[in-house]
Image: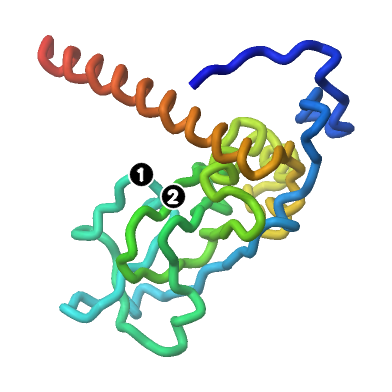
Amino acid sequence: MKFRYREPHEMKDSGVEWLGMIPKEWEVSKIKYHTSSLNGCAFKSEDYIESDNSIPILRIGDIKDSIDFENIKKVAEKLEYEPYIVKLNDILIALTGATIGKSSLYKTEKKAYLNQRVGVFRAISINNKYLYYKISSNMMKEFIKLECSGSAQENIGNSDISNFSIGKPNYNEQEKIATFLDKKTAEFDNIIAKKQAFIDKLT
């Protein structure tokens, strides 16, 4: 994929401190105008069960690229839990604790419920992968730090994250940016994996 740096005359001030300059044809918009969100259920430890029909619940510790469904807390399938079902390509984000702001994509159609203090964002009028890269960006992490400043216990809500302003190109360009980032991320992951294998071999 070809890319180039834009010339100064092709840029404009976004009017948002953490965005700075953006391409002139881009819009500045808040996440809430392009997504829906979901809050988790307050499952209790006594609700946990192990059976063939039990359903995994996604907790903060399960926010990772690959979820270990063999070692995950589960609950009985109930109608009252249906509003908390996580869907394929949902964006998960930690809303509290040491890993606040950590995010991942739910990459399976396996049925699971969302636990409290884990938020979900679903793209409506924006490319889902582009949205994911915005939510997982360092700018988002800095935004969360500012929102939580002065609090004894770091907590943030979906409504706070929804107010995060992003640069928004047209859908076609969003898709191209997401594809480019996918490619570069895969390249970096491959380099890291090779270095780790080399370290393991030396060890």
- Image coordinates of residue 92 in percent, x first then y, are 49, 54
Q: Quadrant of residue 130?
A: top right
Q: Earlier in the sequence, mark 1 or mark 2?
A: 1
Residue 193 vs residue 156, the one in the foreground: 193
Q: What residue is disc 2 on?
A: 105
- From the viewer's perspective, tell me whether residue 45 is left or right of residue 130: left
- From the viewer's perspective, tell me whether residue 12 is left or right of residue 167: right
- Image coordinates of residue 100 in percent, x first then y, are 55, 45
Between marks 1 and 2, how big is the CA–CA gap? 7 Å
Q: Secondary structure at mark 2?
A: strand
Q: What residue is shown at x 30% (from left), y 52% (from top)?
A: 67
Image quadrant containing the C terminus:
top left
- Image coordinates of residue 169 in percent, x first then y, are 71, 38
Instruction: Say if 6 sits above or below 91 in the image.
Output: above
Q: Do the CB atoms of the residues marked 1 and 2 lie less than 8 Å apart?
A: yes
Q: What residue is disc 1 on?
A: 65
Q: Quadrant of residue 144?
A: top right
Q: Secondary structure at mark 1?
A: loop
Q: What residue is shown at x 57% (from left), y 53% (from top)?
A: 95
Residue 14 vs residue 143, the one in the foreground: 14
